[in-house]
């Protein structure tokens, strides 16, 4: 399927819930697929993933413990992550030994921080964006406290300028240059979960390295969404989940990256037996001999079911041409949705919000878009801020959208996020979302 034809999905492999499935009681076609624009939170299941998971259940039923070495579909559980590493490395722009399919996002973040956050009396701070995803904020605070520092001093949060929602590149680079000698780790989200801003990863990484800082990234909302080149950008480490744009299923297995330049360094590792060389792993030696590279961070054997689900989706990515074609289609779909929303009589350009809503919390129902307009500063997600802030407008619109089969997600108190993911979204889904948005507002006023 051509990525240029926006009227049909890029891949026919994905199964979207029907309107009846999502209880869209106001929709007159209950058996049609819903308008699913929530892949930024949880991607839908693919037919390939469903088949591979069923195969793993069959392997479990027919081989039991022998499935670790004798697998009916040629995926012995001792090596089940091997094909995932190959495909995931391609997605994030890394070498195969630089990635590991393992754990969960925050657990992997703690593992990386344990190895790379080594504060000194002069260089002990962590630089991040203000209002990073809460799990990251919790992790940063707990990491600095474990070294005896106060998060209020040791965690520097960069905020947007007054009246703005996105961070300016020059402001980030300026604070790195100013605070660099005191910063141990620079760690931003690749794509900011709330606003949908794609941070300038390459320039931030470069500036951090110039100042002698370690640079890591949380790619939860970036992986599978925007093109990434972790190796070439000289990123030290990165972590990500896979259940959003990589469609691995709820709570799916996560991933991490460590640049190969660290392979021969003596890093602190929270070791586990799955990070030990496979050749001697089952001999149960008393001394840990890690796999060279990122896979030496593995601790426990991964769930075959979650790995199979991820593998299925990655195979669909590969068949679709990986990130090049996907990014091209994503740019067109997101721009189309943005244009349709701009045509709404309830849309207020961000630059006009302060003038139209001088009191902030009073005025006619409306919305603006807080995701950057520059396509190079965003992925598939558009974050809609509903006005007046602090009112019930967002909740009323969200309820109406759901009732008509438009599935996005809300972020209290005033934001709804919509993401036309390029693998399975179409122009009609964008049109339906805009149509039912208008209908929701008409019901309010």
Image (spheres, grey):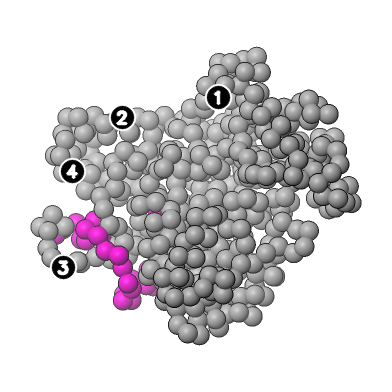
The residue stretch that appears in magenta: 255-280
Mark 3 burial class by Cα count in 10 Å: few <14, some 14-19, many 20+: few
Report, in whole angstroms, how far the alpha carbon at label 3 lies from the one at label 2: 37 Å
Measured Cα–Cα span from mark 3 to mark 1: 52 Å
What is the spatial separation of the Cα atoms under label 2 and label 4, in whole angstroms?
17 Å
Q: How far apart are marks 2 and 1 (CA)?
A: 24 Å
Provide the residue designation for mark 4. 68
Residue 59 percent location from the top left of the image: 22, 33
Q: Can residue 226 be seen in this view?
A: no
The earlier-in-sequence mark between 3 and 2 is 2
Q: Distance between the residues labelled 1 and 4?
A: 38 Å
Residue 79 in the image: x percent, y percent?
Answer: 24, 48
Category of crowding for the residue at label 4, using alpha-carbon neighbours closer than 10 angstroms: few (below 14), some (14–19), many (at least 20): some
Reading the chain from its start, which is encountered first: label 2 or label 1? 1
Quick check: can you spot residue 192? yes
CA–CA distance between discs 3 and 4? 23 Å
Residue 431 in picture, x, y percent from top left: 71, 30
Tell me the SS state at disc 1.
loop
- In terms of sequence position, does the residue under pointer 2 or pointer 4 come before the other? 2
Tell me: residue 13, above or below residue 119: above
Residue 62 position in % (x across, y down): 17, 30
CB under 8 Å between discs 3 and 1: no
* Closer mark to the observer between disc 3 and disc 2: 3
Q: In which quarter of the image is the C terminus?
A: top right
Q: Circle 1 sits on which residue?
A: 22
Q: Residue at left 33%, top 73%?
A: 267
Q: Mark 2 points at which residue?
A: 54
Asked if the residue at tag 2 contacts the one at tag 3, i.e. Cβ–Cβ closer than 8 Å, the answer is: no
Q: Residue at x 58, y 58 (%)?
A: 132
Relative side of 164 to 362, left or right = left
Q: Residue at x 52, y 25 (%)?
A: 17
């Amino acid at each position: 399927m051509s990525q240029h034809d926006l009227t049909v999905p890029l891949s026919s492999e994905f199964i979207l819930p029907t309107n009846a499935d999502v209880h869209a009681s106001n929709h007159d076609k209950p058996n049609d697929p819903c308008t699913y624009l929530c892949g930024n939170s949880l991607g839908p299941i693919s037919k390939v993933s469903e088949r591979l998971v069923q195969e793993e259940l069959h392997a479990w039923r027919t081989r039991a413990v022998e499935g670790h070495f004798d697998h009916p579909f040629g995926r012995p559980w001792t090596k089940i992550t091997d094909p995932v590493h190959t495909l995931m490395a391609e997605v994030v722009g890394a070498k195969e030994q630089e990635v590991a399919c393992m754990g969960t996002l925050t657990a992997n973040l703690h593992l990386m921080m344990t190895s790379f956050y080594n504060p000194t009396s002069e260089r002990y701070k962590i630089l991040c964006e203000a209002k990073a995803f809460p799990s990251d904020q919790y992790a940063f605070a707990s990491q600095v406290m474990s070294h005896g520092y106060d998060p209020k001093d040791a965690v520097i949060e960069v905020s947007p300028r007054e009246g703005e929602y996105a961070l300016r590149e020059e402001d980030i680079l300026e604070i790195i240059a100013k605070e660099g000698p005191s910063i141990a780790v620079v760690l931003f989200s690749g794509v900011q979960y709330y606003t949908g801003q794609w941070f300038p990863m390459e320039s931030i990484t470069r500036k951090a390295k110039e100042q002698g800082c370690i640079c890591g990234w949380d790619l939860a909302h970036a992986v599978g969404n925007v093109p990434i080149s972790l190796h070439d950008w000289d990123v030290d480490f990165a972590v990500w989940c896979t259940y959003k744009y990589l469609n691995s299923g709820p709570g799916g297995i996560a991933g991490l990256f460590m640049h190969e330049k660290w392979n021969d360094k003596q890093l602190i590792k929270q070791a586990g037996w799955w990070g030990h060389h496979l050749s001697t792993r089952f001999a149960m030696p008393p001394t840990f001999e890690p796999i060279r590279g990122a896979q030496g961070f593995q601790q426990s054997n991964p769930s075959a079911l979650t790995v199979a689900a991820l593998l299925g989706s990655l195979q669909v990515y590969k068949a679709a041409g990986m990130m090049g074609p996907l990014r091209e289609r994503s740019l067109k779909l997101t721009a189309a949705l943005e244009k349709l929303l701009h045509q709404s009589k309830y849309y207020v350009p961000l630059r006009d919000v302060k003038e139209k809503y001088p009191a902030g919390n009073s005025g006619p129902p409306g919305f603006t878009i807080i995701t950057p307009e520059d396509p190079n500063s965003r992925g598939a997600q558009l974050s809609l801020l509903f006005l007046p802030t602090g009112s019930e407008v967002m909740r009323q619109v969200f309820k109406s959208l759901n009732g008509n089969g438009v599935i996005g997600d809300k972020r209290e108190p005033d934001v709804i996020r919509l993401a036309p993911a390029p693998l399975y979204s179409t122009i009609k889904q964008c049109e339906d979302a805009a149509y039912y948005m208008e209908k929701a507002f008409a019901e309010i006023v």
